[in-house]
Amino acid sequence: MPVQHSKASLHAFYAAALRNGRSTAERLRAPVSPRFLALLAALPISTPRRALDVGYGAGAYTVVLAEAGFTVVAVDQAPAEPLLQLLSQRQDLAERVTVVESLIEQYPVQEDFGVLVAKDVLHYLSRDDAEALLAQAVQASRSVNVHYLEIFTAISRKDAHGAQINIEGEARYTPKSLARALERIYEGWDLTVSWDDHTEQDTRSRRTYFAATRATVIAVRRRPAPVGAAAMKGRAAS
């Protein structure tokens, strides 16, 4: 019988880790991935310089985006104080960042963000909430937009006794179900998804207590044709 963990206990665990400056098995304080840095360096010049970091955690992606000249909205239910303290040491960055301490699924995405980042967080939401958030961002898109997502699928968690652990209300995507959802949400966008196996082990026993297939998603919306050009094309066809 799987062991059910509540979202409240999960929130308490990560809040304590962030406030105490502890890392966790998934390396909350890890640097930004080289893949994201390469993506950031190659952004089209017409990309709006406003970004949304969904699930800011320890703030690595928020800081890198601000350093790249973006105005950043960082949203997470994780405590804001550690990120605000980090930003207070860099006044030039603090002026570009708005930190919103909120449940991610309750944040309304209504702006045309040039870049959206959601790393290792969407799998904790329900499928409906995760997909609604992304769909809102797609609907709000008006220009060149780039979404960078890292999402765990086919998750297996085990406690010290080998019993399966489930998190209350989480999406529980399989690679196939996530791929289908992404194709539906990002219809008309350039969509690239790569997959890799991810495991986490106990440092002493070397026992694997977390295993998953991680999807790294890059979705790019190109600037649409001008309205005038579309009208001319329509008249020519008639």
Image (tube, rainbow, N blue to C red):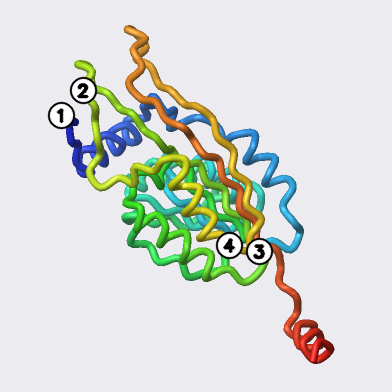
Say which label, 4 or 1, has the lower sequence index.
Answer: 1
CA gap between label 4 and label 2 equals: 39 Å
Contact (CB < 8 A) between labels 4 and 1? no
Measuring from the top left, give residue 217's x and y in whole percent.
57, 45
- The numbered dot on residue 48 is 3
- Secondary structure beneath dot 3 equals loop
Name which residue type carries label 2.
Answer: Ala
Write down the quadrant of residue 109 in the picture.
Answer: bottom left
Mark 4: few/some/many CA within 10 Å (<14, 14-19, 20+): few
CA gap between label 2 and label 1 equals: 7 Å
Name which residue type carries label 4.
Answer: Glu
Measuring from the top left, give residue 184's x and y in whole percent.
51, 60
Which residue is identified by label 4?
Answer: 187
Which residue is identified by label 2?
Answer: 163
Q: In the rendered image, which quarter contains the N terminus?
A: top left
Q: In the rendered image, which quarter contains the C terminus?
A: bottom right
- Secondary structure beneath dot 1 equals loop
Residue extending furthest toward the top:
205
Mark 1: few/some/many CA within 10 Å (<14, 14-19, 20+): few
Residue beneath the point at 76% across and 83% down: 230
Q: In the image, is 74 to the left or to the right of 116?
A: left
Say which label, 3 or 4, has the lower sequence index.
Answer: 3
State which mark lies toward you, 3 or 2.
Answer: 2
State which mark lies toward you, 3 or 4.
Answer: 4
CA gap between label 4 and label 1 equals: 39 Å
Mark 2: few/some/many CA within 10 Å (<14, 14-19, 20+): few
Q: In the image, is 95 to the left or to the right of 156?
A: right
Mark 3: few/some/many CA within 10 Å (<14, 14-19, 20+): some
Residue 179 seen in this snapshot: yes
- Secondary structure beneath dot 4 equals loop
Which residue is identified by label 1?
Answer: 1
Say which label, 3 or 2, has the lower sequence index.
Answer: 3
